[in-house]
Image: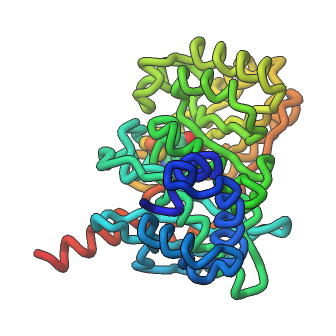
Amino acid sequence: MNIYQFTREKLQLKLQELGEKPYRATQIFEWVYKKSARNFFEMTNISKSSQELLNEHFVFPKLHLEKEQISKDGTRKYLFRLHDGNLIETVLMRFHYGNSVCISTQVGCNMGCAFCASGQHKRIRNLDVYEMVLQVYTINEILKKEDSRVSHVVIMGIGEPFDNYNNTIDFIKIINDDKGLGIGARHITLSTSGIVPKIIEFSHLPLQINLAISLHFPNDKLRSKYMPVNRKYNLEKLFDALKYYYEMTNRRITFEYILIDGINDTKECCIELINLLRGMNCYVNLIPMNETNTMFRRSSEKATDEFYDLLMQKGINVTLRRDQGHDIDAACGQLRIKTEMANARKNC
Ligand code: SAH
Ligand code: SF4
């Protein structure tokens, strides 16, 4: 069994099955996540016999770091190779308020959004809990050596977290646990393309984490054209679920909106967006499009400014996301695809 796979609650149950005291789960969590222990023999408050028993049942795997790229603005991108050879990427962004890690939840993504590099590659598999935990853990270990730590986590890398729901929730519990990595719930943001039943399920969780919705288009016609998820869960269904989420949690929702030249950056689109969001406690995060293929272009500065200004004028909370790590392809899925293409070329 893999030690990073367990929430503290699940570890307690497992330890009981093995005839161990459940409180050992807290001790183990502290050793693993706070003191960076990589085996049970370092855990000096655990008896020799327990250490040996635990050692027979659990392993402490690592993610293999295939490549690290550092951008001029300090953003770092890590490409990890998994035990089965698949590659995933994790991005570390440096802000004045802390260090934010953007993690992947799947190898590839089945949602097929037309503008997204990840969506152009079908999902190969879901990530296990430990593979998500180790993305944060490994970067935290790197930062510890620099007298720093991971303070924020965004679940916005490759994959659709609500298409890997149970593993993602266990992952969140582990990083949020104050005996684990202790990342505050308000410092964790999950982004989804809008899988409605999972938004409802998520509304019932006693976790105060932030929810972001990849909206990107203000009407069904455009959204269904470029985001297949909208053909199943259209804007009416999505917004009903979000209203329910808000009733249950009282938490403000973030809408992500990539500005794509000539497609969703017009004044008409902006007005539709304003009407859609009217009366909601939300804010809009405008994102400069990362040009991953030839079909779409990033909006001009003029169109971006006009879109932003109109939202502001109409009283919508809006931010323009800083374009981090642009020189190292730090957008959804790009590094992985480049490396795979390079490897494929090498193998030819
Ligand atoms: N699957 C989830 C989370 C991962 S995608 C989701 O879609 O929300 C993380 C964010 O990156 C999403 O808002 C996504 O729409 C955005 N994104 C995808 N392709 C992009 C591109 N080419 N340029 C900028 N942002 C992009
Ligand atoms: Fe998947 Fe999100 Fe990319 Fe859409 S935007 S293809 S849901 S990773």
321 to 279, vertically: above or below: below
Which quadrant holds the N terminus?
bottom left
Residue at the bottom extreme of this rendering: 145
Where's residue 223, x and y in %?
50, 26
Question: Which is more toward the observer, 96 or 99?
Answer: 99
Which quadrant holds the C terminus?
bottom left
The quarter of the picture where residue 245 lies is: top right
84 to 167, vertically: above or below: below
Residue at 77% across / 52% down in the picture? Answer: 187
Q: Is residue 347 visible?
A: yes
How many numbered circles are shown? 0
Residue at 50% across / 49% down in the picture? Answer: 17
Where's residue 191, x and y in %?
61, 42
The quarter of the picture where residue 36 lies is: bottom right
Residue at 69% across / 46% down in the picture? Answer: 189
Where's residue 78, x and y in %?
50, 73
The quarter of the picture where residue 196 lies is: top right
Q: Is residue 75 visible?
A: no
